[in-house]
Image (cartoon, helix red, strand yellow):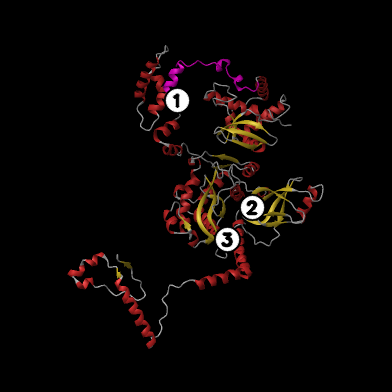
Amino acid sequence: MHKSLFAPGSRIVLDGKNAIIANENEDFFILFTEDAAQKEVSKKVLQIAYQEGRMRFNVDSPDSEIARKPFLTTKEAKEAARLLAYLEPMTHYDNTGSTNTAATVIKDVVKKHGDAVNPVPRPITLYKWFRKWTQAGKDILVFFPAGRTSRRKSSIAPEYLELMTNTIDELVLTRNHCTVARAYREFRCRAKALESKNRIPSQQAFYDHFHRTDPRIKIKKQQGNSALVEATRIALRTYEVRHPLERVEIDAVHVTMALLDEHLTLIANQLVIYLAIDVYSKAIVGFAMQYGFNKSENAEGVTECLKSILHDKHHDFPYLTKPWPGGKPTTIVGDPGTAIISESFTNLAGHYQIHREVTEARQGWKKPHIESYFKVLRADFLQRLRGYVPKRSPGFKLDHKLKDIRGFMAHEVEKMMITYLVEGYNHAAQPKLNGMTPHEKWLEGVEKYGEPEMVDDLSFANSFGGTLTKRVLDPNKGIYQNKLRYHSVALQNLYFESVKKYGEKCKVEVRSSSQDLTQIMVLDPKSRTYLSVPCTKDLPEGMTLTKFKAQSKVVQQWTQKDTLKDSAEFENSQSRVRQIEGSKRSRKQPEATEAQLITDQQLEGYFSQGEKNSDLTKSVSVAIPEPLIGATESDPERATLPEAPNDRKMTVRRRNS
């Protein structure tokens, strides 16, 4: 019978971040992180993190519940961690007074931690440690000198200590900073003004107080945030590996590319490629690909990449002519994204006993091989593809549209990508390997240390693929998801076994993959096994969600056009458009007509009208522009006005009588 290891109030370090267990529910722990965020973590996930070493109790922190302030020194904290490595597993057992229990714990701890827990205690010694530890309320300081907690108080007065901090912040920790010596002289002047009875600290004490400032704070305040980011990305150490798959780095690259389907319809503008590289041989051992519109990383893609590492990939890609290595890795390194720290990926890695290491943000040097390979991938392969848009390309945004670029189909890109990774990179000589190919380096490691373990049965891994949702199970129609129906006889039997009365609402857990819509996995709550349920619609093999949405959109557009064309509303609207177009005034000149003779009656009518107009000349006159008035005397020809056309109205004005 195992007891609970975690309790509310415990301070822990989870994936490199300080946190405190604030509350406990039936299945979850509520954690408060150091950045004032609150999140729920499953008890199973926290237990796996503790077993993998990604979670530890905060021993050497100044505000740790175990250290009780003041905190331990580096040497003492290392010894405390060794003691806790033996003491904490003892809390899992009820019979802690048995030497067999102590011997079992010692054997498991040595197997897990190795030389870090030396020297190894005897079972009777471990029993004495555990009894002393529990009697002291699980206080680790009980193993250290009694006077350890009463340290000498600081000789610097509180008012001077605050003044030193303010002076350093104002004069030294700024962009245009002065020297520490000048800051100390300013500090002495301000300290004398306080007229305190306490002794003013010396220059060495001022220097020591300045040097205790975090170096990252110094860089940020003196040089800016960009300098801090650059400093955090500097490699602090190198990783040495001894055999293949001892350390595998996994990450994803986002590629802007136009992807088409069989009908030349644009189905994606974003391609997410997941790759895993072996640090020992520099060979690509894992691959997965997703595409869509503005696609982002998710747990499904990372899980598919891990599955490709575990098994033999030649059955999935028979067109490969050269071997592609793989096997079960010892450690997988990834960035702190939601895909890597997801529950599905955590459970899958824990099941196969794969240690997961999560790096901090903006510290790419902890997985440098996969980061540097992405540059090689873009320069050596992606730039040759039709429809690829280079990274940070301003010309693309100004002069091109993605839909106007001719691209590839998704399966064509996948085939070319895999062929390049295996035959163009893994079997090509690399300068960083002294002219050897990654595959030759892999064979050299296999010859020395043996072939890595290959996972043939991926039935358990397949159950963790895709997204996990809850759906309503209908006994007659099955499960509706992504505008598709999934149903089978086994699914119908599951409904009648789950409900007490026909007609009750039944919800089940469903795992579905966006890369294969032909089937879904439904969890049987009693047997804890997954049922494979096929789609009722006849879908081609390998139909993806992105491709299905694009085809459905095209079909819907054509259906709307055909329905509208046959409807009465469409005919009425078309006739209305023709009427409006017919009633519009034309800007074209009327057609010319043939000249005809004028009769005598028409001439008399014109002459009579002219006589009437001549009578009106006494009272009206044509308005002449002012520039032409002065030209009548000097230049009679300029004063002559051109005759106005018959169809143009002249502006007239009445003279004052």
Q: Residue at label 2?
A: 513
Q: Mark 2 packing: few (<14 Cα in 10 Å), some, or many (20+)?
A: many
Q: Which residues are magenta?
A: 137-165
As for residue 164 lying within the magenta part, the answer is: yes
Give me the residue at 44% from left, 21% from top.
162
**Distance between mark 3 and mark 2 Cα atoms:** 24 Å
Residue 300 seen anywhere in this rendered image of the structure = yes
Residue type at tag 2: Ser
Nearer the observer, 370 or 571: 571
Residue 465 seen anywhere in this rendered image of the structure = no
Residue type at tag 1: Arg
Q: Is residue 199 above or below residue 28?
A: above
* Chain-order first, disc 3 or disc 2: 3
**Which is more foreground, mark 3 or mark 1?**
1
Q: Residue at label 1?
A: 212
**Distance between mark 1 and mark 2 Cα atoms:** 52 Å
Could you say whether the residue bearing mark 1 is in a helix, strand or loop?
loop
Could you say whether the residue bearing mark 3 is in a helix, strand or loop?
loop
Specify whether 92 is left or right of 36: right
Residue type at tag 3: Tyr
* Chain-order first, disc 1 or disc 2: 1
Q: Residue at label 3?
A: 319
